[in-house]
Image (tube, coloured by chain):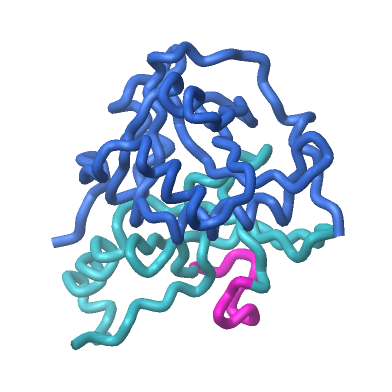
Amino acid sequence: MTGEPIESYLRSEEPPDDAVVVVRGGPVSPEKIVEHAHRQAREYTYRNVPMYSISVSLTVPGWDLSALLAGPLSSRSTFAVSTAGVVRAAGFELLPTYEAPHYDLLLATGEYREAEALLGLFGSPEPNPYKRRGR
Amino acid sequence: MGVPIEVDIPCDPTQIDHTGMPWTFLDEAAHPERILEGAIIVTGDAEDPVFARVASLTERPTGVKVHLEILPGDPLEYVEAMRRSHLLTA
């Protein structure tokens, strides 16, 4: 079984270091990072190897944090943020995939310890004020 | 103590592909026979479940890929609306 190369879905843009990287909640945990990264690696490759990654949203032009939380993240109860500079300085690559503001944040192995290290770069989970709640 | 929440099929609602829709694999479903095109199902995960409509099922080399249309609002809002209109007891 081979995955589909992600290369044909890449955009050509380089986010600035101060761009906010938003990881989705529900919950923000290493277990979920591992689950989602392995699902991605089952379906996609990058540079001819399985692509362990998670979906994140960035504050690229046209998208501020409120727009992200009310848009792509609107179904998520919690979120956590870091910056592109911090994430990249720690060795994680950000790939602009599909339509902005979507990015894939690449992991080397998709294993638990790597997911823990990644989440250490993010702030504490916060409630998404744009997620509506039943009463 | 309540019954644990069990989603029909887990997914990350932010994990999209070129279609713009979130996706997951059919073999991750607790009951794959419920995952039919057009069906309303519960997805996400137990901590943050959402309603979705099954948009399509596609054979891929790596398995059957399920695309989902996430429905707006919180599942509890739907329950409240059904209670108000007595749909649950009609």
Report the residue at 81% width, 45% height from top: A4
Please state the horizontal and vertical placement of residue A86, each as a whole percent of the image: 41, 24
Please state the horizontal and vertical placement of residue B90, each as a whole percent of the image: 27, 85
Which residue, as the protein is rendered here, is positioned at the far left?
A135
Please state the horizontal and vertical placement of residue B20, each as a whole percent of the image: 59, 39
* Displayed quadrant of residue A11: top right
Nearest the eye: B76 or A87: A87
| Magenta range | B28-40
Total residue callouts:
0
Report the residue at 24% width, 61% height from top: B77
Which chain, by letter, is cyan? B
Please state the horizontal and vertical placement of residue B82, each as a whole percent of the image: 25, 71
Quarter holding the N terminus of chain A is bottom right
Report the residue at 19% width, 88% height from top: B1
Against A19, residue B11 (above or below) is: below
* Displayed quadrant of residue B24: bottom right
Quarter holding the C terminus of chain A is bottom left
Nearest the eye: B61 or A49: A49
Report the residue at 54% width, 60% height from top: A35
Residue A23 placement, left or right of A77 = right
B45 within the magenta span: no
- Main SS of residues in magenta: loop
* Displayed quadrant of residue A5: top right
Which chain, by letter, is blue? A
Against A55, residue B78 (above or below) is: below
Residue B21 placement, left or right of A2 = left
B38 within the magenta span: yes
